[in-house]
């Protein structure tokens, strides 16, 4: 598929941050964000700073996006561990505000993943984790509404359509086919087209 030049330009220099899924844990394709970027721009020069177990606070503490000159930022699982670890207090709130301010000040388009709301396999902690998930997602929606060029992606809408045997390596991490499935899902959703500035984004 030949994508419009505006879309290719947005995905010419993607910066990826987040945790293990964004890092492409167990695969060699760079994760779903990298696969997605290459679907739009096969010549994309990707910088991937994601690493296993990273919280958004750790990922963005010393992040200076201008140092990488990105054209778009992808953080599909950036906020997952903040919620699961219950680290959503004042430090998290301040870090999230600073991060969104940085996106807005640089007019940088971004696709950020909400934390999926599902039954976490953590026993008695599941209810507490669910409370943190809802808090994180509400904060993301609040900031994204003001950022304008931030697209919020709900991974649950993709995960529910996936076949566990082919798409997951261990119940949490994605296989190469899983990365490709998520990338194709984002492509077919079409929300990314709004990042080229043709129209304002609607918060998902």
Image (spheres, rainbow, N blue to C red):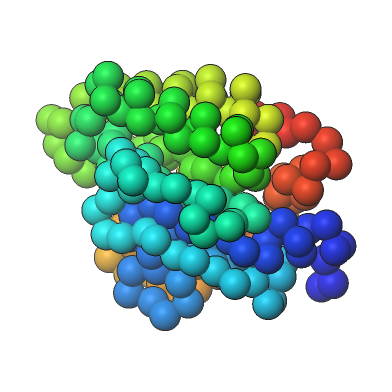
Residue 188 vertical position relative to residue 91 in the rendered view, above or below: below
Identify which residue, 105 or 185, lies in the foreground.
105
- Left or right placement of residue 203 versus residue 85 in this view: right
Residue 161 vertical position relative to residue 103 in the rendered view, above or below: below
| Quadrant of the snapshot with the C terminus | top right
Residue at point 44%, 26% (across, down) = 97
- Residue 160 in view here: no
Identify which residue, 148 or 30, lies in the foreground.
148
- Seen as rendered, the residue at the extreme left is 124
The answer to which image quadrant residue 144 occupies is top right
| Quadrant of the snapshot with the N terminus | bottom right
Residue at point 30%, 28% (across, down) = 92
The spot of residue 9 in percent (x, y) is 76, 61
- Seen as rendered, the residue at the extreme front is 67
- Left or right placement of residue 204 versus residue 175 in this view: right
The spot of residue 94 in percent (x, y) is 35, 24
Residue at point 32%, 74% (across, down) = 26
Residue at point 68%, 77% (across, down) = 43
Tally the numbered discs: 0
- Residue 202 in view here: yes
The spot of residue 24 in percent (x, y) is 40, 68
Residue 93 vertical position relative to residue 187 in the rendered view, above or below: above
The spot of residue 67 in percent (x, y) is 49, 55
């Amino acid at each position: 598929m030949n994508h419009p030049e505006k879309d290719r330009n947005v995905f010419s220099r993607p910066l990826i941050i987040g945790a293990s899924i964004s890092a492409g844990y167990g695969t060699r394709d760079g994760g779903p964000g990298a696969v997605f970027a290459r679907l739009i721009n096969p010549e994309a020069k990707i910088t991937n700073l994601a690493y296993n177990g990273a919280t958004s606070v750790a990922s963005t503490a010393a992040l200076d996006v201008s140092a990488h000159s990105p054209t778009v930022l992808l953080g599909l699982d950036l906020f997952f561990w903040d919620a699961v670890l219950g680290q959503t207090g004042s430090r998290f709130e301040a870090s999230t505000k600073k991060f969104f301010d940085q996106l807005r000040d640089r007019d940088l388009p971004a696709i950020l993943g909400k934390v999926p709301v599902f039954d976490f396999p953590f026993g008695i902690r599941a209810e507490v984790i669910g409370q943190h998930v809802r808090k994180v997602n509400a904060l993301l929606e609040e900031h994204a509404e003001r950022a304008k060029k931030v697209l919020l992606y709900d991974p649950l809408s993709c995960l529910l359509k996936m076949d566990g045997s082919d798409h997951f390596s261990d119940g949490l991490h994605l296989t190469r086919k899983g990365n490709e499935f998520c990338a194709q899902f984002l492509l077919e959703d079409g929300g990314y087209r709004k990042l080229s500035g043709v129209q304002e984004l609607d918060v998902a």
